[in-house]
Image (tube, grey):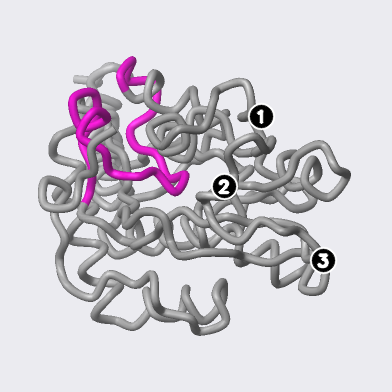
Amino acid sequence: MKKSITSLMAPVMAGLLFSACAFTATAASSGKATILVGADTTFPPFETEVNGKVTGFDIDMIRAIAKAENLQVSLKTMPFNGIIPSLQAGSIDAAVAGITIKKSRMQNVDFSNAYYKSGLSVLVKADSKIKSFADLKGHVVATKKATSSVDYMTDHGIDQRYIKQFQDIDVAYQALMTGGADAVVFDNPVNVNFKTSHDKSVKIVGDLLTGEYYGIAVSKKKPELVKELNDGLAKIKKSGEYHQLFVKYFGGDTRGAVKGVESPSSVAVSD
């Protein structure tokens, strides 16, 4: 008795189906989960964009952490003041933008352990008579919009009318150089970066105004991601990759390096 074509093909089709399922399962198990990371590219040397390529300390760091944890990073650039709302909405998983760990922010997002210790400083032109923060009253001060520098100035007696806020810190520096502002109050490593490239034109005056820590902000919708990021940070510290980022972006200046484990709750600053 002849077997029908259908009956002859059934074992073959079953075998093909089994093979396809096995292949799919293997691909799924070996694939890397992708995390969508928000970044503000107007914060050199932590984040910047050169010739369409996003780069910087934070960018290299999050990619190294992701690699250590078998994750893949997809970047989404946005203004700094859009980062927290995007995390709250769950439209991004995490964010790197030199984000100060603050108690108020911890109500809306989670943070990784701290990865950088910073502080605010005052940058002025080389011939300025301003010698410290105390001399800023009555002067126009430029900074970046919605950052902790704005909070610090308003809390310490600088009238809002004298604070010029810009989306891009480079525009704040431009205002200083062209006479549109008398000083820039911003994160010290960024001021140092600007001073390095304009060494005879500007100077940093006075002491650091604050001691604050940066962390990777994480959506509260992704609580498991915090542990992965913390584990990855510990791994790149141990491997030496973390140290190499300070060599690459700060000329080996490791004053901002966090040597131990600093949890968000232990370093969070008040507004």
Left or right of 53 in this view: 91: left
Give neighbour class at mark 2: few <14, some 14-19, many 20+ (Cα, 10 Å).
many
Left or right of 130 in this view: 56: left
Q: Which residues make up the magenta segment?
A: 88-112
Mark number displayed over residue 164? 1
- The residue type indicated by label 1 comes to Lys
Q: Are marks 3 and 1 in contact (CB under 8 Å)?
A: no
Res 79 → quadrant: top right
Does residue 268 sit above or below 76 in this rendering? below
Q: Position of residue 152 (x, y in %)?
A: 41, 38
Query: Tag 1's secondary structure?
Result: strand
User: Residue at (18%, 25%) from the top-left corner?
Assistant: 107
Query: Tag 3's secondary structure?
Result: loop
Residue in the foreground of this view, choosing between 116 and 33: 116
> Does residue 37 appear anywhere in the picture?
no
Q: Which residue is mark 3?
A: 201
- The residue type indicated by label 2 comes to Val
Question: Magenta segment: does it hold 103?
Answer: yes
Question: Magenta segment: does it hold 36?
Answer: no
Left or right of 244 in this view: 7: left
- The residue type indicated by label 3 comes to Ser
Q: Which residue is mark 2?
A: 185
Distance from disc 2 to disc 1, alpha carbons, whole Å, reads: 10 Å
Distance from disc 3 to disc 1, alpha carbons, whole Å, reads: 21 Å
